[in-house]
Image: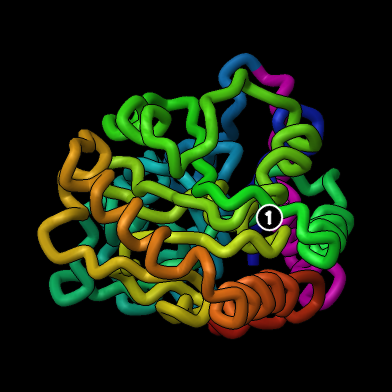
Amino acid sequence: MKVYFNETLKPNPTWGSHLLLIELAFFLKESMNCVLHLGSISKKNNLINTSDYNATIMDCEMLIVDKANDSCKLISFSESPSDAYKKIIENRNNPNDILIGPHIYANWGVKPQKNKFKVHPLIVFNFCPKTNYDYFYYKRKCLILNDSIISQLYFRCTTGRGSENLLHNNKHVNNRHRPMDIRDYLSNLIQYNCGLSIPAGTYEICHRDIEYMSVGLPMIHTEYRFPYFPKLTPNTHYISIENQDLHRQECEGGSKYVERYINKFLEVKDNSEFLNHISHNAYNYVKSFTGQSRLNSLIKLLNI
């Protein structure tokens, strides 16, 4: 088998997904003697090319080519359909092929009933693998013990969600703050009662969700529409709002969205037992899908 990927540990930021792909590549090399084709982000376009299919592999992707079994397997964290997907997986439409990634149902328009290849919607991972999230998880537990939690809903984004101004004008939501270094950002958000995450357009899971969960901040989120792996269970791993008619236009925002967010916050903010339940389960959800257990799960998904 041939494995195509990029060396992605030098850029800023380096995402958890970058580290995952490199861990998986060397796991495949060392355990299955796969041939690695390593690209470099120092190249002008930050992409590598697979001569077999004349397709570029992005720095957030890995392609596994198994000619003996007529199989191509693509792991992609791209927010939109990538060149490798369109030229290889979609074009072949082969039942031996596998597509894995967080945005393939929501943002890529992939329809499982119309495709012969297998699809697995993977979660995203921590924004910064260099950060010790356990430190912030336990720091937050100390804040709770000292009754130092701010009884407000926390939200901050950098991509201009439509409801953001309305949220920050509400007394139950934190004040808007400047963009922060990841450590300052986490130190800030763990002080709050709950965190809000708003889907970005058609795709619905992002780094913010996993950041909240990694530090034990109970997250309010419209119910996930897609069956992510590992499974995210409403009102177990996060505080769920029934999406009903909300989700499709949620990125544009408006008063009806903000009203639902605030009402859900007011409903749960004083229920310490429920919030601790969410915090504990969310933290353990993220912790359980790390290291060797995560690699083993991916090997099963890849059917190797």
Judge left or right: residue 51 versus residue 32: left
Kindly identify the residue that appears in the image at 22 percent across and 73 percent down: 112
- The picture places residue 176, in percent across and down from the top left corner, at 52, 25
- The picture places residue 126, in percent across and down from the top left corner, at 67, 52
In this rendering, the answer to whether 140 lies above or below 207 is: below
Specify the quadrant of the image occupied by residue 6: top right
Which residue does the numbered mark 1 point to in the structure image? Answer: 21
> For the image shown, how many numbered marks are present on the structure?
1
Judge left or right: residue 184 versus residue 267: right
* Callout 1: SS: helix
Magenta includes 35?
Answer: yes
The foreground one among 27 and 174 is 174
Position of the N terminus, as image quadrant, is bottom right
Kindly identify the residue that appears in the image at 31 percent across and 58 percent down: 263
What span is colored magenta in the figure? Answer: 16-43
Whether residue 302 is visible here, answered yes or no, is: no
In this rendering, the answer to whether 2 lies above or below 257 is: below
The foreground one among 69 and 260 is 260
